[in-house]
Image (spheres, rainbow, N blue to C red):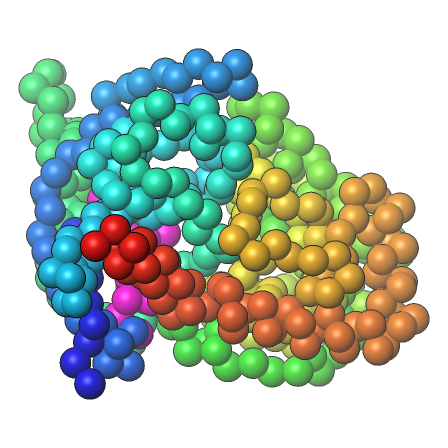
Amino acid sequence: MKPSCTVLIHTPQELNHSSYIQTGLFELEHMGVITVKVKLSFKRNLGFLTVTKDGIITKKERPHSKTSFYTLIDHTTNKKITFAADLYDHAPHFSGVALKECDFYFKRNYESRFVKGIKAEANAKVKKLGIVFGSLSENRRSRGKFKTGLFVTNLSLNLKWDRNPVKRLLKSYGFQKHHWNFTNAARTIARFENFENATTDTIMFQTRCFLHEKDKDLQEIHQQRYRIIKLLRKNFSDTFEGGFVPSTLAKTTYGDALTNVPTQPEEYLDAMKKARIVIYTRGLANSPAWKMAEYLSQGKIIIAEPLTAELPVPLTEGKELLYFKTDSELIEKIKLVLDTPALGEELSKNARAYFETHVHPVQNTKRILELMLNRSLEKS
């Protein structure tokens, strides 16, 4: 059967986060559902908008690099629909270009209060993207175009005719080279599709420090993670695994809370697959961390700090996971699932089902494509 639509991927300025949408698209193409074409884009896409708590919008002439751009061509109506995927951590920040030029804008860290605040600036319909994570499709194509788009666009953004143009370009080139190599070493979607039942009674919480503690949000995140690591080690000394991934900051400030679990992504995933209970805390700027998607993919029993991001389909307390708000509640919830095996089995089963239905790149990308196609048919 001929694919019902074609999706153009306009080469993005960032590949790590945008890999989620690309994986969904290339997997759907492999299934024969759509056709995918990669189109070189050297657009600078300047326009970084922020909504303050008071509803004031500020604008800066810089790119919103974690927003990627696409064109959907509906073969039934021959209409073109432009859309963007905003995978940035911060809910108040938006791509001004995507809001103005696209028909749809799918936001990872979606909070209604900020979306309402940006409404006057938006021609695009802003929608919830949901929980995402980085992964690679073995069916990915056009590596040369992606690499060229990444390097040329970012070198252009860093080109300034001052005293040190060569130094700046060399630094940018080195950063993009590292970024390219890092994203190409990402785990394939098949690693998350491969579901294994827990083989140990391990309680796992492995986390990291960000590069610095210069602002209050980062300090609070680090202090919370440190406190939880110590708490879990104290209460579950025989079964707890995890801690901070070693880094300069972690070693100097939280040296007594370093992890005892492998830190390389593939080895960490292997260890996590064996664990029974996992702990989730908020990501940077209250963003839904990739860790949640990874946990759901392996059907873990998840004890989580409540999400502030709004999801297309909410995660339900007592169905896919258990929420905690205090340290004592965290310990109580862990003991509850340890003492109630049937509850743990139900949470595990439902977590995996949520991943398969709402988080897997194929299913989520298919959802947003169908949403746009249906809107197109309604207007025709």
What residue is rendered at 25% in x and 26% in y? 47
What residue is rendered at 11% in x and 47% in y? 41
Say whether residue 58 is visible.
yes
User: Hey, which residue is sitting farthest bottom in the picture?
Assistant: 1
Say whether residue 244 is visible.
no
Front-most of residues 97 and 263 = 97
**Magenta-highlighted stretch: main secondary structure?**
helix
Q: Position of residue 113 (x, y in %)?
A: 53, 29
Front-most of residues 147 and 116 = 116
Magenta-tinted stretch? 13-27
What residue is rendered at 89% in x and 72% in y? 340
User: Hey, which residue is sitting farthest right in the picture?
Assistant: 339
Location of residue 93 (image quadrant): top left
**Residue 265 lies in the magenta-colored region:** no
**Residue 14 lies in the magenta-colored region:** yes
Q: Quadrant of the C terminus?
A: bottom left
Q: Position of residue 176 (x, y in %)?
A: 22, 46
Q: In which quarter of the image is the N terminus?
A: bottom left
Q: Is residue 209 left or right of residue 28?
A: right
Q: Position of residue 179 (x, y in %)?
A: 28, 50
Q: Position of residue 193 (x, y in %)?
A: 48, 78
Front-most of residues 109 and 73 = 73
What residue is rendered at 58% in x and 68% in y? 354
Q: In this view, does 257 lie to the left or right of 154?
A: right
Q: Is residue 340 left or right of residue 246?
A: right
| In the depicted structure, whether residue 95 falls above or below residue 304 | above
